[in-house]
Image: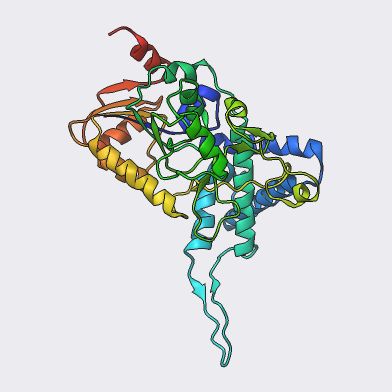
Amino acid sequence: MRTFILGAGFSYAIAKAPLMHQLWDFFEEAYHEEKSKNNSNIRTCLYEKLEKFINKIEESAKNRFKEKNNISSDVKQNLEYLITLMDIHSEYSANLNFNFSNADVTPYPVIPLPFTNQGHLKELKDAISTYLYIVLEKLKENELLHEFSSLIKKEDYFINFNYDLLLEKGLWSRQLWSPLEGYIGVKKFKYSSDYNDLMNANLNSKTYISKMHGSLMFSTEGLLPSNEIKIKLDNNEKWDFFFDELYNLLSREPEKLTGKTAAKSSEANKGKYQPNWIFPSFVKPFNSKNFYEIWKSAFNRISKTEELHIIGYSFRPEDTNGQLLLLNLPKASKVILVDPSQKVKQRVENIIGSSIDIYYKSLSDYIFDYSAPR
């Protein structure tokens, strides 16, 4: 019973994917790329509204310290805080109640930011979602991914907190993972023909992944309010499939919108992307029943795990869900940690109540050790 918990540090090691404090720099780079194409497209407007919002928050905070000079802020380097602020104000805020005789007025959320409202917050989340998609879909893996994938056995199980598809691509290349039954809690496909084609090719997954925060392939497009997630194999940023081999397996071309539909659609190039995922927030509202199944399965697996490999996931103090997950680990379990930070090592040991069995500061060291003859 070997289980892997993967965080942003894993994707950073194999593809230089951004860590949280680096994410805004990647957003900014993507923004300038979009601006070079068209000065007034939807994406540039989204970025500029998000940046303006952050600047106003920082300005409002700094005004409380007018007597101080050279004040700096790190909101852009701490997007988890920003998204948490949005979640609290849009999902859980108190209400202003309007009590007028003979009138039925919907309560208005108490948002202590004079320059925004619920609709504005939704638009800002769309901006974050869109730029996350743009940044993560173009990640290019290095040789470490293939070396890591070569160590995996079909009995292994993955608890993956990343949206990207790097792990899936590595396991797909070794015929260990497939979108067909490979995602815990998400079984249905946007196109039923994709399911049938994968079934006919006998491409059932041998390994399983719980995508704790969602995936680039998770979609709720055109579905009823139930918010049921379906698997979408199309990368509409490139009018392509996420896996090249699907061209020879599927009985359809990659989804491509054209003409007026493309100009208006949120899935059109230069438009918005809204995959169904849980944002990197200190609060984790589950917005579909699929996520309950994903997390339930992860908790169940952890409770039976004999050997746990934690790679690049820091269990931040605010991450109560992640810490509760780790608390279900049996005391007899062997724990292997891969992370450059001694603080993370200490944090994990505090949670599990014992010392880490094996500790590596880098993924390359881990791979070298596990690749050696035993």
161 and 312: which is toward the camera: 161
Q: From the top left corner, tell me how far across and down residue 45 is, in percent.
A: 74, 49
Task: Give above or below for 322 relative to 349.
Answer: below
Indicate the colouring scheme: rainbow
Give the left or right position of residue 235, taking residue 354 as reference: right
At a point 62% along the width and 51% down the height, the residue shown is 126
Give the left or right position of residue 295, taking residue 142 as reference: left
Give the left or right position of residue 143, taking residue 342 as reference: right
Q: Is residue 103 visible?
A: yes
Q: How many marks?
A: 0
Furthest-top residue in this view? 373
368 and 76: which is toward the camera: 368
Name the image quarter holding residue 190.
Answer: top right
Q: Quadrant of the N terminus?
A: top left
Task: Give above or below for 64 relative to 349.
Answer: below
Furthest-bottom residue in this view? 101
Furthest-left residue in this view? 332
Q: Is residue 164 visible?
A: no
At a point 41% along the width and 35% down the height, the residue shown is 209
At a point 46% along the width and 36% down the height, the residue shown is 180
Q: From the top left corner, tell me how far across and down residue 10 is, in percent.
A: 45, 27
Give the left or right position of residue 104, taking residue 369 as reference: right
Q: Quadrant of the C terminus?
A: top left
281 and 254: which is toward the camera: 254
Q: From the top left corner, tell me how far across and down residue 132 is, in percent.
A: 59, 40
Q: From the top left corner, tell me how far across and down residue 204 is, in percent.
A: 43, 31
Task: Give above or below for 305 relative to 126.
Answer: above
